[in-house]
Image (cartoon, grey):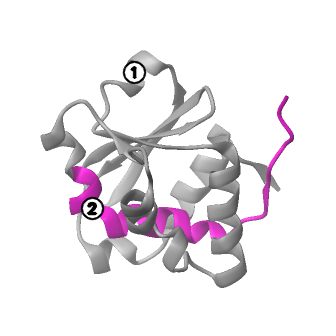
Amino acid sequence: MTDFPSVEWFKAAADLLNKSDSFKRLGTCDSEMGVQVGDRYFEVDFEAFEVSNVKEIDANRADELDFVLVQSADAWKAMLDDIKANGRATHDYTLNSLDLRSEVEFARGKDYHRRDAFYRFNQTFQEFFDNSAKMQTTFPVTA
């Protein structure tokens, strides 16, 4: 079992995506994506046909990424629980739906042209999270 959020969780999701045929189906993806959960930030780098790097970063580095996906720990848990229960995100929990329905920005970035990577490569990012259905994820209680 792997805790979410953690570098280990993101690396496990990256390994699953790298081993799948997703990049062949969806095409290359070049983006530096961030994920924020509470006060923790993670970077996931997509280069051509692989996820090339995963690491925990600080807020300053997050500001330099193409975009950062931001929602509460409870919202992340709900999304990942939906993916686990259904094998992939259902309508209310797709990245696109979360972005469109959110009252605050879900995909945040200072440079709109770089943030556009979220929309261009959306299906690859969705596949990254959807593969977590194959993982045993735990959600440690935080104070």
Is 52 above or below relative to 102?
Answer: above
Q: Which residues are magenta?
A: 117-143
Query: CB atoms at circles 1 and 2 under 8 Å apart?
Result: no
Label for residue 77? none
Is 101 above or below relative to 130?
Answer: above
Q: Residues within 10 Å of mark 2 (few under 14, many from 20)?
A: some
Secondary element under disc 1, as helix, strand or loop, is helix
User: Residue placed at 27% from the left, 61% from the top?
Assistant: 121
In the rendered structure, the answer to whether residue 79 lies left or right of residue 64 reads right
Instruction: Give how far across and how far down residue 140 sits, in percent.
Output: 84, 43
Instruction: Give how far across and how far down residue 119 sits, in percent.
Output: 25, 60
> Which quadrant does the C terminus fall into?
top right
Quarter-wise, where is residue 69 in the image?
A: top left
Quarter-wise, where is residue 132 in the image?
A: bottom right
Check if residue 113 falls in the magenta segment: no
Is 140 above or below relative to 13?
Answer: above
Instruction: Specify whether residue 18 is in view.
Output: no
Q: Residues within 10 Å of mark 1 (few under 14, many from 20)?
A: few
Name the kind of residue labelled 2 in the image. Phe
User: Residue placed at 24% from the left, 30% from the top?
Assistant: 110
Instruction: Specify whether residue 39 is in view.
Output: yes
Name the kind of residue labelled 1 in the image. Arg
Instruction: Give how far across and how far down residue 12 sits, in percent.
Output: 62, 55
Q: Name the residue beneath numbered marker 1.
A: 61
Check if residue 140 falls in the magenta segment: yes
Instruction: Give how far across and how far down residue 139 sits, in percent.
Output: 80, 49
Label for residue 121? 2
Q: Of residues 114 and 128, which is closer to you in this image? A: 114
Q: Of residues 87 and 23, which is closer to you in this image? A: 87
